[in-house]
């Protein structure tokens, strides 16, 4: 079921978001890792297409690779802003007082992923 031209696609469901995260995490180093671990642009497109194939749910909006990539970027951006606000980095960055901040020593429960 596709949205009409000029119409917004429906929001990702909780199930779709879970499938998106489950699809991206194993491929994270290829998509966002150090330059020596990343793949070429056309290979990334193929990865996002494969993730979208996993995210698609019968009877719900048919997600494409670009939709999944954009939603993942939105999630990453929101997480980064939340972390910055919790650490008080956002206000310092806006004032230009912060050039290089090191976060406090806190154990990373996410295994090094954003």
Image (cartoon, rainbow, N blue to C red):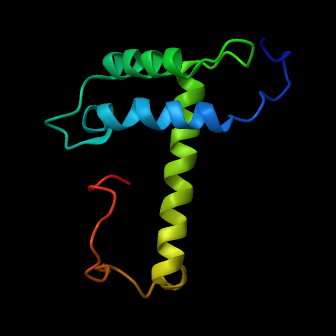
**Residue 64, position in %: x, y?**
59, 18
Point 65% across, 39% down: residue:
14
Closer to the camera in the image, 94 or 9: 9
Would you say residue 31 is visible in this rendering?
A: no
Closer to the camera in the image, 99 or 9: 9
Point 43% across, 88% down: residue:
97
- Residue 15 as seen in the image, left or right of residue 3: left
User: Relative to 26, is 100 above or below?
Assistant: below
- For the N terminus, give its image quadrant: top right
Point 31% across, 31% down: residue:
27
**Residue 21, position in %: x, y?**
46, 38
- Residue 4 as seen in the image, left or right of residue 49: right
User: Relative to 36, is 50 above or below?
Assistant: above
Q: Quadrant of residue 32?
A: top left
- For the C terminus, give its image quadrant: bottom left
**Residue 74, position in %: x, y?**
57, 46
Point 61% across, 33% down: residue:
15
- Residue 34 as seen in the image, left or right of residue 23: left
Would you say residue 43 is visible in this rendering?
A: yes
User: Relative to 39, is 86 above or below?
Assistant: below
Numbered-mark total: 0
Q: Quadrant of residue 48?
A: top left
- Residue 69 as seen in the image, left or right of residue 7: left
Closer to the camera in the image, 80 or 19: 19
């Amino acid at each position: 079921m596709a949205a009409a031209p000029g119409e917004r696609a429906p929001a990702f469901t909780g199930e779709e978001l879970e499938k998106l995260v489950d699809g991206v995490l194993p491929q994270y180093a290829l998509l966002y890792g150090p330059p020596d671990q990343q793949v070429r642009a056309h290979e990334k497109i193929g990865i996002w297409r494969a993730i979208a194939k996993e995210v698609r749910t019968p009877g719900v909006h048919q997600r494409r690779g670009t939709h999944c990539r954009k939603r993942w970027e939105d999630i990453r951006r929101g997480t980064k802003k939340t972390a910055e606000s919790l650490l008080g980095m956002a206000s310092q960055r806006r004032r230009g007082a912060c050039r290089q901040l090191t976060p406090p020593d806190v154990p990373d429960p996410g295994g090094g992923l954003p």
